[in-house]
Amino acid sequence: MTDDVMIELQHVSKSYRGQQTPAVEDVSMTIRRGEIIVLVGPSGCGKTTTMKMINRLIEPTSGRILVDGSDVTSLDPTDLRRRIGYVIQQVGLFPHMTVATNIGLVPKMLGWSRTRIEARVDELLHLVGLEPGHFRNRLPRQLSGGQQQRVGVARALAADPPVMLMDEPFGATDPLTRDRLQNEFLRLQEKLQKTIVFVTHDFDEAIKMGSRIAVLGERSRIRQFDTPEQLLSNPADQTVAQFIGAGASLKQLNLRRVGAIDVDEAVLVRLDDTPTSALRRLDESGEWAVLSVDSERRPQRWITARDLDPQQDTLDGAGGPVTTVELHATLHDALDAMLASSSGATVVVDDAGRYRGVVNIDRLMRAIAEMREMQRNRDRPVTESPEGTATRTPPTQRSGIPATGDGESR
Ligand SMILES: Nc1ncnc2c1ncn2[C@@H]1O[C@H](COP(=O)(O)OP(=O)(O)OP(=O)(O)O)[C@@H](O)[C@H]1O
């Protein structure tokens, strides 16, 4: 096991008592430090069983699992909890305990002092975007689904484990909350660099979250273990291709983040500006609308000439709704936001919801064209020319055999 490897599954199988066929059969997989590995596959294929064997909620029938070099069967349960955080769809918060007590459970088990636990709870609540003063003493039922899920993540992070297991962690939330939680989590992961095993049914979520994705078939057999880019452009076989579905090229929009593309500038006006000055700005710019922002530069409304009433003193309340996306959102999210907005554009905001720019449909189309171009260049294998310089072989000369990633595909 090299330093780079955090989790290793070696020929792991699990047969439940009374079952004819194993739930998991001979799975081997190597997971590197700081990766988010997504296990994705049809219902009942053994994703959860595979994941739960990593933290010994389920014991393998055969094979070995190493976490940071230690065989999990040799670790005592407290040690295992310190090393592995666990987040599940049903959140699993204890209903009669406050948010703080829930988050502090593992540190308490590890014998931390009260002051250290309190400081850690507040730090974690901040980290997941919940104001400690507001939320520390609440009971789980006094939180929204999304807030409960954030507390679940905070609790899993409490003892700062290097590994996190996440079983459909955002599955129970509505699509909007789910998007937001995914983005927040990706932002968090940039700071924390945990090694994460993430289970989902949802292939779009897999593409968005995964550094690499393991597409599982029956008995958790790995059909392909690859980066999202490779899976989309070179599915290993027909089953994987079917699973990815017909919308593969649209799904490629999930590969790129809004923060990675150029954005346009909107004409900004402040809420306390007058309609007359907004009209002047609109005329000067030749744009179809101006964007009002509050004193913190948070976007408020798109205002067209029709919305401007010279009888009013300010722009407060004028114009139509704005949809926003964060820098961590994917181009797919941006497209959704655009389609949901009557303006054909969506406003990009930073973590604090402040204006950063605008993405419109033209910008999105250009980004897609760029991605296609990059993909075409990547797909051309590098060959040595007689002078010893590497050149790209035209795509027509490729063998046509789909790439199988890093050798772990079957
Ligand atoms: N405790 C158990 N006893 C017997 N069989 C089980 C048990 N838990 C799971 N199984 C079976 O093992 C197989 C794999 O289940 P598992 O929950 O790992 O699948 P999954 O891919 O996570 O499914 P889903 O996506 O529906 O949650 C299924 O056929 C399931 O019925």
Image (spheres, helix red, strand yellow):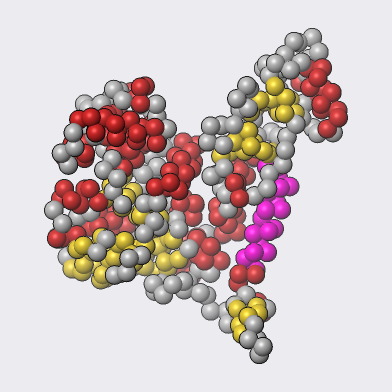
User: 134 or 27, which lies in front?
Assistant: 134
Does residue 388 appear to the left or right of 97 in the view shown? right
Residue occupying the point 46% across, 40% down: 184
Q: Position of residue 183 (x, y in %)?
A: 48, 43
Residue occupying the point 18% across, 51% down: 79
Q: Is residue 374 magenta?
A: yes
User: 63 or 13, which lies in front?
Assistant: 63
Does residue 404 appear to the left or right of 304 in the view shown? left
**Which quadrant of the rendered structure holds the N terminus?**
bottom left
Q: Position of residue 37 (x, y in %)?
A: 39, 58
Residue occupying the point 72% across, 28% down: 268
User: 249 or 76, which lies in front?
Assistant: 76
Does residue 242 appear to the left or right of 13 in the view shown? right
Residue segment shown in magenta: 359-376
Residue 124, relative to residue 307: is it above or below?
below
Residue occupying the point 36% across, 47% down: 168
Q: Position of residue 252 (x, y in %)?
A: 58, 57
